[in-house]
Image (cartoon, grey):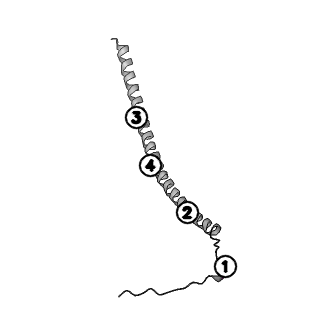
Amino acid sequence: MTKNASWFWVAALFVSSLALVDIRSRYLLLFAHEQRLMSQKDALHVEWGRLLLEQGTLAEHRRVDRIARRKLDMVMPDPRRIVLLYTRPKRIP
């Protein structure tokens, strides 16, 4: 092997090792970004579940109100006719 060929292979090895370091660095940055996105996805999934439960609860109240108004002819009383009664709690011996 000639001296020029040896220098060529040393330079090629050096350049490829620098490229390997660069690629590894980019991989680690992308992996960290992916982990943050996965964590955010999980948090959004949990929030979505909570919102679905809340929607179901609110829809149930609306359904009961609608049935009470349509089938039972119930209405909200006039606020001036509402009487609040306050009682004292019983003492437990």
Q: Secondary structure at mark 4?
A: helix
Residue at (64% x, 77% y) in the render: 77
* 3D distance between C-alphas at marks 3 and 4: 23 Å
Q: Position of residue 52 (x, y in %)?
A: 52, 56
Q: Residue at x 45, y 46 (%)?
A: 38
Disc 4 vs disc 2: Cβ atoms closer than 8 Å?
no
Q: Earlier in the sequence, mark 3 or mark 4?
A: 3
Which residue in the protein does label 3 denote? 24
Q: Nearer the viewer, residue 49 or 90?
A: 90
Crowding at dot 2, Cα within 10 Å, few <14 / some 14-19 / many 20+, comes out as few
Name the residue that disc number 1 marks: 78
Q: Which residues are magenta?
A: 75-80
Q: Amino acid at mark 3?
A: Arg
How far apart marks 2 and 3 lie (CA) works out to 54 Å
Q: Residues within 10 Å of mark 4 (few under 14, many from 20)?
A: few
Q: Magenta segment: does it hold 77?
A: yes
Residue tagged 2: 60
Q: Earlier in the sequence, mark 1 or mark 3?
A: 3
Q: Nearer the viewer, mark 4 or mark 1?
A: 1
Query: Element type at marker 2?
Result: helix
Q: How far across and down, in percent of the image, does residue 89 sit?
A: 44, 85
Given this view, does label 2 or label 3 mark the residue nearer the observer? 2
Quarter of the image for the C terminus: give it. Answer: bottom left
The amino acid on which the numbered mark 2 sits, given as a three-letter code, is Glu
Label 4, label 1: how far apart the Cα atoms are:
50 Å
Q: Residue at x 65, y 79 (%)?
A: 79
- C-alpha separation, residue under disc 1 versus residue under disc 3: 72 Å
Given this view, does label 1 or label 3 mark the residue nearer the observer? 1
Mark 3 closeness class: few <14, some 14–19, many ≥20 residues within 10 Å: few
Q: Residues within 10 Å of mark 1 (few under 14, many from 20)?
A: few
Q: Write down the residue under mark 4.
A: 39
